[in-house]
Image: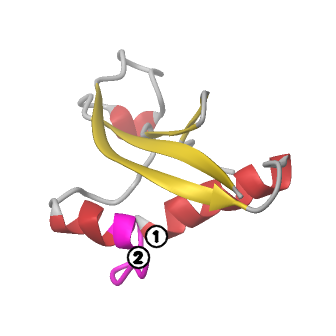
Amino acid sequence: MHELTTTVYLNQARLHDLGFGRFEPAKLYAAAGFTLTATGQPSTEQIKASLETVFAQLNIDTPDQPWALKYRLAGHRSLSVGDVVVIGETAWACAPTG
């Protein structure tokens, strides 16, 4: 079992919903930090599935993961275009499509 250190950064730039750093520099705020687990050595598929879980949990009305509930109770908005999720040492920005 491997632990995947995960951090969610909300982009507070005025035009963040047009894309990460596209029209103005990002203004990232570390909104949450938590640990996900992977069975065995983390693979590309497991990381992708973890990203999809983070996105889904932070965008539904009633998340079932403790870290997502804590995120919601803190009053944070849904994960959106221009926001960033870091798993381990790799960062992914939420894009307008895809």
> Which image quarter holds the N terminus?
bottom right
Residue 78's disc number? none
Q: Give the range drawn in magenta.
A: 59-68
Q: In which quarter of the image is residue 58?
A: bottom left
Viewer-closest of 40 and 17: 40
Q: Does 25 sit above or below residue 86?
A: above
Q: Can you identify the residue that label 1 sits on?
A: 57
Q: Main secondary structure of the magenta part?
A: loop
Q: Residue at x 84, y 49 (%)?
A: 43
Viewer-closest of 10 and 97: 10
Q: Residue at x 17, y 68 (%)?
A: 73
Number of other residues with Cα within 10 Å of mark 2, as a class: few under 14, some 14 to 19, many 20 or more = few
Residue 42 on the magenta span: no
In this view, which residue lies farthest toward the top? 25
Residue 93 location (% of width, % of height): 54, 36
**In the image, is 69 to the left or to the right of 23?**
left
Q: What residue type is labelled 2?
A: Ile
Local secondary structure at mark 2: loop
User: Can I make out residue 96 in this image?
Assistant: no
Residue 61 on the magenta span: yes
Q: Which amino acid does label 1 sit on?
A: Gln
Evaluate if marks 1 and 2 touch, with contact meaning CB atoms under 8 Å apart: yes
Number of other residues with Cα within 10 Å of mark 1, as a class: few under 14, some 14 to 19, many 20 or more = many
Viewer-closest of 23 and 70: 70
**In the image, is 46 to the left or to the right of 33?**
right
Residue 95 location (% of width, % of height): 57, 42
Q: In which quarter of the image is residue 46?
A: bottom right
Q: Residue at x 49, y 45 (%)?
A: 6
Q: Can you identify the residue that label 2 sits on?
A: 60
Residue 33 location (% of width, % of height): 37, 46
